Amino acid sequence: MERGLVACTDIDDLMQTLNINHHPLDWRLFIDSSKLRLKTVLHNGNTLPSIPVDHSMHNKESYENMKILMEAINYNKFKWQICGDLKVIALLLGQQQGFTKYCCFICEWDSRARSLHY
């Protein structure tokens, strides 16, 4: 447990304990977040059950908390494909969240200008 995050730091040992052959290309890292909760599971289609690898109750969704999460589970070692909603993907990519004035970064079209909508 570190900074409100409970995480499994040794995925290889976890898989060995569960008698599962761990091939990182076969697994997906599913990240789900809400305003006050952040949880991550490893998912392998419908062949095996999902395996929870970390959980945080009181950390808000932010880039810093995602960075702590990824470091805690040694993401750089396994490089699983990541699944999640658009909010999580935007966090991981460092993009702006929420309501934005300009929805298109190329044309900087003002998305709140209702009179200009077609």
Image (tube, rainbow, N blue to C red):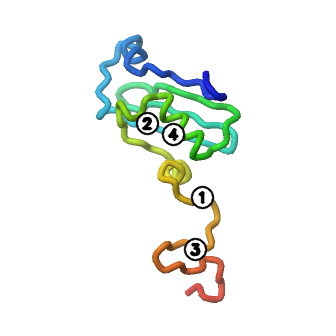
Question: How far apart are the two marked residues, 3 and 2, measured between alpha carbons?
Answer: 31 Å
Write down the residue under mark 4. 31
Q: Position of residue 29 (x, y in %)?
A: 43, 36
Q: What kind of residue is marked 3?
A: Tyr
Residue placed at 57% from the left, 46% from the top?
A: 63
Q: Position of residue 19 (x, y in %)?
A: 35, 13
Whether tag 4 and tag 2 are in contact, CB under 8 A, the answer is yes
- Which tag is nearer the camera, tag 4 or tag 3? 3
Element assignment for label 2: strand
User: First in sequence: mark 3 or mark 1?
Assistant: 1
Decide: is 16 above or below 79. Answer: above
Residue on which disc 3 sits:
102
Label 4 amino acid? Ile
The residue at 53%/48% (across/down) is 88
Other-residue count near label 3 (Cα within 10 Å), few / some / many at <14 / 14–19 / ≥20: some
- Please tell me how crowded label 4 is: few (under 14), some (14-19), or many (20+) other residues with Cα within 10 Å: many
The residue labelled by disc 2 is: 29
- Residue labelled with disc 1: 97
Query: Between disc 1 and disc 2, whose residue precedes?
Result: 2
The local crowd at label 1, few if under 14, some if 14 to 19, many if 20 or more residues have their Cα within 10 Å, is few
Are the residues tagged 4 and 3 within 8 Å (C-beta)? no
Q: CA distance from mark 1 to mark 4?
A: 16 Å
Looking at the image, tell me whether mark 1 or mark 4 is earlier in sequence order: 4
Type of the residue with mark 2? Leu
Residue at disc 1, secondary structure: loop
Query: Looking at the image, is mark 3 or mark 2 earlier in the sequence?
Result: 2
Q: Position of residue 104 (x, y in %)?
A: 50, 73
